[in-house]
Image (cartoon, rainbow, N blue to C red):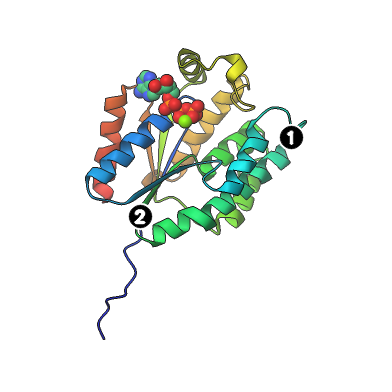
Amino acid sequence: MSNKSSAPARGLFIAFEGGDGAGKSTQVAMAQQWLEARGSQVVTTREPGGTQISEALRSLVLEHGHGEIDSRTEALIYSAARAAHVQQLIAPALNAGSHVICDRFVDSSLAYQGMGRALGFDAVAQINDFATDGLKPDVTIILDISAADGRARRVAAGGGVEAADRLEAEPDDFHERIRNAFLELAAGDPERYLVVDATLSVAEIHAAITTYLAGLL
Ligand SMILES: Nc1ncnc2c1ncn2[C@@H]1O[C@H](COP(=O)(O)OP(=O)(O)OP(=O)(O)O)[C@@H](O)[C@H]1O
Ligand SMILES: [Mg+2]
């Protein structure tokens, strides 16, 4: 029998991680254009968000004004948003053969809630394994930036203290813990991570990323 109806090859799942202001959104857009120029279908999305329910949960957890949000609740809201995102958008797109680029994924929860909020990697990994049904990025690109450099960038971009969301508003030592958490995750699984110095120029970072992706495609 012929195999005309065989499913398309599964796309590559690429996550971008890094502190606030590291340049994720900048590089996500450039990576998308680069992949599309090579003739690939690409779905670009972000966390928390990406679906209607996930965007509603994003507002709950990032906006000020919902009263106290304790660390466990925060971790569960992020993972609930992620469950919907994987089920409704990411997994279907990968199965249809698109590459998926996601601006933040599980590692942000491990870093911000696991280390930043001190819930521990293990507890946060457990709820996220449930949320994602075990889906992991094929590659995670970490844009490495110090707390001070990240803050300087957010200020330069017009996002001062008043514009900061609940997590951005945390002090520098919180953001240093986040940075170290990302580096620790990368060191624990070097095959699946690319760490790039986020203080390089936009073009240099893009070149490092595309060289790496070209090797995977
Ligand atoms: N390599 C770079 N060098 C200097 N400035 C940069 C670089 N990359 C991005 N920027 C600038 O830094 C600011 C933050 O970039 P961007 O929004 O891409 O970061 P982000 O990681 O998505 O931030 P957030 O976590 O807040 O979403 C922007 O003003 C952007 O133009
Ligand atoms: Mg961004």
- Left or right, 35 with respect to 169, comes to left
Q: Which residue type does callout 1 highlight?
A: Ile
Q: Secondary structure at mark 1?
A: loop
Q: Which residue: 54% across, 48% down?
A: 51
Q: Residue 30 falls in which quadrant of the image?
A: top left
- Work out whether 84 lies above or below 106: below
Q: Which residue type does callout 2 highlight?
A: Ser
Q: Tell which residue pokes out farthest to the bottom in this image.
A: 1
Q: Tell which residue pokes out farthest to the right in this image.
A: 67
Q: Disc 2 designates what residue?
A: 98
Q: Disc 1 designates what residue?
A: 69
Tag 2: Cα neighbours inside 10 Å, few (<14), some, or many (≥20)?
many
The mark nearer the N terminus, 2 or 1, is 1
Q: Tell which residue pokes out farthest to the left in this image.
A: 38
Q: Secondary structure at mark 2?
A: loop
Query: Horizontal and vertical percent for residue 168?
Result: 58, 24
Q: CA distance from mark 2 to mark 1?
A: 36 Å
Query: Horizontal and vertical percent for residue 146?
Result: 48, 21
Q: Which residue: 63% across, 49% down?
A: 80
Name the foreground residue: 67 vs 110: 67
Q: Quadrant of the N terminus?
A: bottom left
- Left or right, 54 with respect to 97, comes to right
- Work out whether 182 lies above or below 214: above
